[in-house]
Amino acid sequence: MIYSKLGKNVYTLALLNFINGLGSFIFPFLSLFLIQKVGYSATKAGYFIMICSVLYVPSSLLSSKLSDKHDRKKIMVTTQLLFSVLIILSGAMIGNLELVPIIILVALIFDGATDPARSALFQDCTTLENRQVAFSLFYLSSNLGFGIGATLAGFLFNNYTELLFYFTGILGIVGALLVQFLVENQQPTHQELEKSKEGNLTDKAVEGNIFKALKARPNLMFYIIIMCGFHFLAALFYFGLPLYTTALFNKTGASNYGILMFVNAFVAVTLTPFITKLSKNIHPLLSIALAAFLYAISYFLFGLNSIFIVLVFIMIGNTIGEVFYATNSNYYVANHTPMGHRARFNSIMSILMGAGSAIGPYFSGVILDRWNFKTLFFIAGLGMLFIFIDLLILRQKDKI
């Protein structure tokens, strides 16, 4: 069994990912919520989501600095609890829709603070030998929870919107308590960091600040820049997809989108173990390049089809690409991250790669207000083909 003998901490964090995925009721439907419930235009909704991403930056940077110097488990638990309480408050304020987006903005500041601490905690609990398989399990468990949560959210969205906020918040609290009481802190000690500097592992500790450490890893910097474009194009697509299903299927649009998200999660859960085994014999950059190619093809096909069953099959192909990306990207990055800079590296990379995700929804809204879904999906697909080529070039330069 590929996931055997990974250790208690890894299995507990996989359960955390399942719970957090299960609690992802709000964010897949945020664009729909802002447009259909609050009354935003597509452009304004995209702008709001971009502002959410901008506010992520300062909280993530502060949290990452603290998480590399202090107990990141405590930081992760505290910030996730604060995020969850604010999301529950958003549900309680659903009768006053003008205030809900403001509360969501504040909640996402704490969500931004949670991410680097949580990501570093995941790396602490893995080794170079088991990291690819462990990250594969994290991805699988997250998708299993997300598939169930997104499907339920699709059916609750129209008539029970406040429940989406309550369920997200409650499950976030459960996940934080799970980490507090069941996960052992394996953050490297000062002695362990100093000892690692004598070795030749790719994730050994280094002297200096985050910028010096990044400068010494030019291929990783090139990868992050490519991924900024990758995430921008994916954000174009995923912002437009729920709006596309709503435009095609009217009242059943939200539930149909939920079904597509269930298909996405089901295929991911089913194929992740097999693709992880296959990827062990392939350089991670080649697997990620294949993901970009499959994304490009699926984006083109989404823009050319309006029959739901056809969209389901296209989503299957898209998800296969997603699995190749998800099971190799974190693995590649983690193996090139100095263990003494884990939280800061995760923060910087999340910010730089997330910059694409931040501006993607805004440009998606602009494209939809001026043109149409076919144009949106064509632009996303064409851009992914360029990403595919860039990753092949990077593979030729990468010697590890």
Image: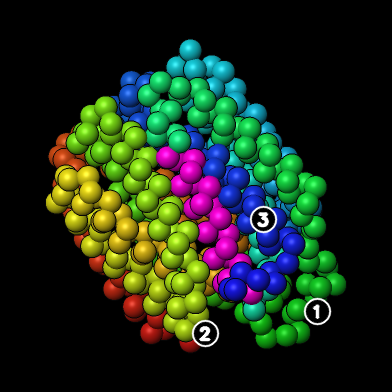
Query: Magenta: predominant secondary structure element?
Result: helix
What's the residue at 80%, 79% (across, down)?
Answer: 195
The alpha-carbon separation of the residues under discs 3 and 2 comes to 28 Å
Q: Secondary structure at mark 1?
A: helix
Gap between marks 3 and 1 measured at Cα:
27 Å
Q: Earlier in the sequence, mark 3 or mark 2?
A: 3
Q: Mark 2 packing: few (<14 Cα in 10 Å), some, or many (20+)? A: few
Identify the disc placed on residue 195: 1
Q: Mark 3 or mark 1, which is nearer to you? A: 3
Please name the residue shown 60% across and 32% down the image.
Answer: 169
Mark 2 vs mark 1, CA separation in Å:
22 Å
| Sequence-first tag of 3 and 1 | 3
Amino acid at pointer 1: Lys
Q: Amino acid at mark 3?
A: Leu
Residue 101 shown in magenta = no
Which quarter of the image is occupied by the N terminus?
Answer: bottom right
Query: Which residue is at the far right?
Result: 191
Give the image location of residue 295, x and y in percent: 30, 61
Q: Mark 2 = which residue?
A: 400
- State the image coordinates of residue 105 (x, y, percent, origin top left): 52, 31
**Image vertical order of residue 384 relative to residue 35, above or below:** below
Among numbered discs 2 and 1, the one appearing first in the sequence: 1
Q: Is residue 8 visible?
A: yes
Which disc is residue 13 wearing? Answer: 3
State the residue at coordinates (28%, 31%).
252
Q: Which residues are magenta?
A: 130-151
Left/right placement of residue 242 relative to residue 57 reads: left
Q: Are marks 3 and 1 in contact (CB under 8 Å)?
A: no
Residue 10 drawn at (x, y percent): 68, 62
- The image quarter in which residue 348 lies: bottom right
Of labels 3 and 2, the one closer to you: 3
